[in-house]
Image (cartoon, coloured by chain):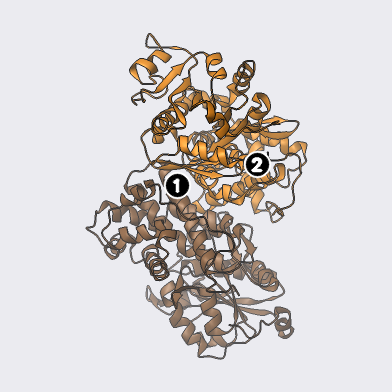
Chain colours: A orange, B brown
Amino acid sequence: MLSHNYSILETLRRGPLQVSIIGSGNWGTVIGKIAALNAKESYIFENVVRIWVHEEIVEGRKLSEWINVEHENSKYLPGYRLPDNLVAVPDLEDIATSTDLFIFVVPHQFVEKVCEILSSYAIRRTAKAVSLIKGFLIDNWKPLPFHQYIQNVLKIECSAISGANVAKDIADEQFSETTLGYSDQESAVVWQQLLDTKYFKVNPIPDKCGVQICGAVKNVIALAAGFCDALNCGSNTKATIIRIGFEEMKNFANLFFDGILEETFFDSAGLADTITTCYGGRNVKCAKEFALAEGNKTWEEIEVEMLNGQKLQGPSTCCDLFSVITHHKLEQSFPLFTIIYCISYQHVPPHAMLTLFQRSETRPIRLKKDCHLCISSNP
Amino acid sequence: MLSHNYSILETLRRGPLQVSIIGSGNWGTVIGKIAALNAKESYIFENVVRIWVHEEIVEGRKLSEWINVEHENSKYLPGYRLPDNLVAVPDLEDIATSTDLFIFVVPHQFVEKVCEILSSYAIRRTAKAVSLIKGFLIDNWKPLPFHQYIQNVLKIECSAISGANVAKDIADEQFSETTLGYSDQESAVVWQQLLDTKYFKVNPIPDKCGVQICGAVKNVIALAAGFCDALNCGSNTKATIIRIGFEEMKNFANLFFDGILEETFFDSAGLADTITTCYGGRNVKCAKEFALAEGNKTWEEIEVEMLNGQKLQGPSTCCDLFSVITHHKLEQSFPLFTIIYCISYQHVPPHAMLTLFQRSETRPIRLKKDCHLCISSNP
């Protein structure tokens, strides 16, 4: 928990805010480009925006050199010119000790390692962070969103961003939106000022946990959508399964967190991201392949076969959901999430998903607004 | 307005309830099949379910004969065996005077004519109705949902059904859901008992107006989705435009009606129907064609070219929305609906839809819960 949330206006007394992107994959690089262009235009940000690069050699040259000399991330975003004021820095200590605004965009599986290293350095106590990481951790049989994890480990305030944001399309400056979950007005203003641009609209909503649960759970709904595709379902059935998934996603968020807002589900993080993920994207494609293989391929095999080194988040988030659901004996409240797990890991045939909902007693439970486990508060 | 809402239990004193389907197109026939099968199993419904047929000759034989002798609607649902207890009746007076439960499924453009004729007969004052008609009328510059119109003209209580319900898929018994908007508990129970089946789940929600606004307005959102397809937008952009449309749909419902419920938008009538309509269906396909024609084809021409006699509801509903919006000077609150109209009828190029939202000042207004025009109450 945070002992004190420092005011950004106080921090500004000593000069413009230093921005650092933690992560230089395709999404990190695109966000770095937007932040660097916006930083040039605003008095409150230091002109140079830094991007932390886990150094590697690409075509005989260091990745940091590619970015700093050629202004291109030749490995993760080839073909896009980056602003001159986006500067690659391979030294995490250098970043850790001189940053006012951290943007976290490392892959899920590296978060704990990176935060551990950062926490060993003297981070500015006045710094703020925003997490663009999808998924959540499990702590004491409860979902722990990454903004909370970052707050706990680094002792700085952390907001959260999630939305229908395919990195490549935003690199192409195609119009899209994202949802910014925040808790204090100053953070909302500063992140919007740093990241909102004409083709990338930042909608602030005071619901960090809701934003992150959507960003993680939509990948599980996409597995069900992929099973529908494999079963050759009509459009009614696929939309119905997605709708049931959406209802379970809302119920899950409301059960485990206080202060979840309905508008989060109507925003980019909810509605828009769920539908793009279910009508395209890797989770739905791999789930279709998984179902068509009729038990003869594991998720790992499909990942290797179809994703060319990228990772699939649906199956691991599905396991996380299932462990939480079974621990709290909530299977009957989450029939879809439960059957997705059984199909994915217990040799249940995909068709069982449809027959399950055709039984009259299987309906997602309508939760009352004030019905939750009160396990975690929403800081 | 209704003077008295009679209890169904009172009506049952004189015997089982007589059910009649008004309309024998494909959706009416599918609903007739479900109702007839359920009527067989329940003590409260008369065994015979009647379906009103606008008599016509199909392959040398009357349509009513096809249904009553061959148990097939050879014109609108060929190839599907109908239950023996679904009986075609061409005489509207016969239907009018002896029906307890009316199910309205006539096309939009015939509703007024049919209701006018029905109202000239002695309808049972205790009768109830449900409307499956999509769209709404305009009355005194306000949207008038069909359940209200039916209530006004026939002086009987009317519920409303809408959802992700492609008739052909439900005829194939593919799993789907629908939303039943009701106002009294008895109506909810009776319609659910008559229409809910294992592959067609009826979710009752006490919000008739919300259900019907969704059913109409989603076709307008689908026009925008079709423009996105023509513009070759990425998945982010299309999802974002759909999301903005969804927000305007919610705002529109809340502005014009009291008692709109959030859960309607999360149910089949809202979320599920909107996404199926935007990722398939005739409105999105025709809108793509319209945009690709770059002003060289009208909607009427496209309808003739692509729909083989079927009607497109998006453009006419778009005109209805626009007339209401401009009358109340609400263009700034509904930028997407307004630009869809301008693209459809005022030679504005489809690309303007994207540039509009890239301007920083164009955002759908976040309405406060208690902000509405108080024009109509939700009976």
Q: Nearer the viewer, mark 1 or mark 2?
A: 1
Q: Amino acid at mark 1?
A: Thr
Chain for disc number 1: B
- Asked whether residue B279 appears in the rendered view, the answer is no
Quadrant holding the N terminus of chain B: bottom right
- Asked whether residue B358 appears in the rendered view, the answer is yes
Q: Hey, which quadrant is residue A211 in on the image?
A: top right
Q: Nearer the viewer, residue B126 or A63?
A: A63
Residue corresponding to mark 1: B240
Q: Amino acid at mark 2?
A: Phe
Q: SS at mark 2? A: helix
Whole-percent x and y of residue A180?
54, 40
Whole-percent x and y of residue A291?
55, 36
What residue is at 57 percent from the left and 48 percent from the top?
A265
Q: Nearer the viewer, residue A323 or B55?
A: A323
Chain for disc number 2: A
Residue corresponding to mark 2: A337
Left or right side of B367 for B358: left
Residue at the extreme left of the image, as rendered:
B296
Q: Nearer the viewer, residue B169 or A254?
A: A254
Q: SS at mark 1? A: helix
